[in-house]
Image: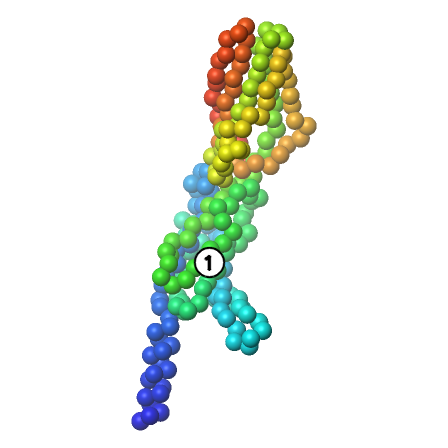
Amino acid sequence: MSRWFTYLLISLFLFSCTKKETLRVSVKNMVTGESVANMNINVYEVFNVSDGVSGTKTELFQSGETNSEGVLFLTEKFNKNRRYEVFVGQFPEEHCYLNRMGYTWSVGEATDLAFEYAPCAYLKMRIENVNCTGDTDNFKLYYLGRQVGGQSPPIVGAQMRDEDGCYFFESSSYSDAPMGERYYRREVTRNGITEIFYDTIYLNA
């Protein structure tokens, strides 16, 4: 009788340590909203090792691929006393923005995990005062941010150029930048009159 009671206690203990949960992992292009199918998702289980030396150990718990809608539904019995790390695999194209490298998740936390990325585009700056009236012209250019990849002052709102006369500049090479919109403000002074313009350029991957 005591043996069966012990078995029952062990079974109840093991059962109480796990909970069946469904993780919803999605992958999409943050700029276009397009879902990304066939993306590999890996879930690792992190647990303490009781040898007094190793600390924690990480093992692959489960993996799968996103469906045609860019979503993987993963239903498993997760251990309540352990944490899990969720990572997305290699993207089909080079990316210059990813909202996060991975998630650390435990039972009881939000089960909707979203990976949002932006492919790389290439930017070459060319600035010209095309309606120049002479040396008294003044041109100021301000960067107001971009569509993806949160930025804050002093980057957003920073003055990029303050030049006089018939100003012209062209960068010597292209630079990597996230796909999507970029926002600028121009202040052009001619004959003592200042005009302000707002520009949006779109970088396509």
Asked if residue 67 shows in the view, the reply is no
Horizontal side of 76 relative to 152 (left or right) equals left
Question: Is 204 rendered above or below residue 21?
Answer: above
> Residue at left 63%, top 12%?
166
| Residue 1 picture quarter | bottom left
* Amino acid type at image mark 1: Thr
Horizontal side of 15 relative to 175 (left or right) equals left
Give the x, y percent position of residue 123: 59, 31
Q: For this rendering, which residue is in front, 188 or 102?
A: 188
Question: Is 162 rendered above or below residue 158?
Answer: above
Q: For this rendering, which residue is in front, 157 or 83?
A: 157
Asked if residue 17 shows in the view, the reply is yes
Q: Badge 1: few (under 14), some or many (20 or more) residues near its Cα, within 10 Å?
A: some
> Residue at left 45%, top 64%?
83
Give the x, y percent position of residue 16: 34, 74
Q: How many marks?
A: 1
Q: Residue furthest right?
A: 172
Q: The residue tagged with tag 1: helix, strand or loop?
A: strand
> Residue at left 49%, top 63%?
44
Residue ID for mark 1: 104
> Residue at left 57%, top 16%?
139
Q: For this rendering, which residue is in front, 139 or 128?
A: 139
Q: Residue furthest bottom?
A: 1
Horizontal side of 21 relative to 126 (left or right) equals left
Question: Is 142 rendered above or below residue 165?
Answer: below
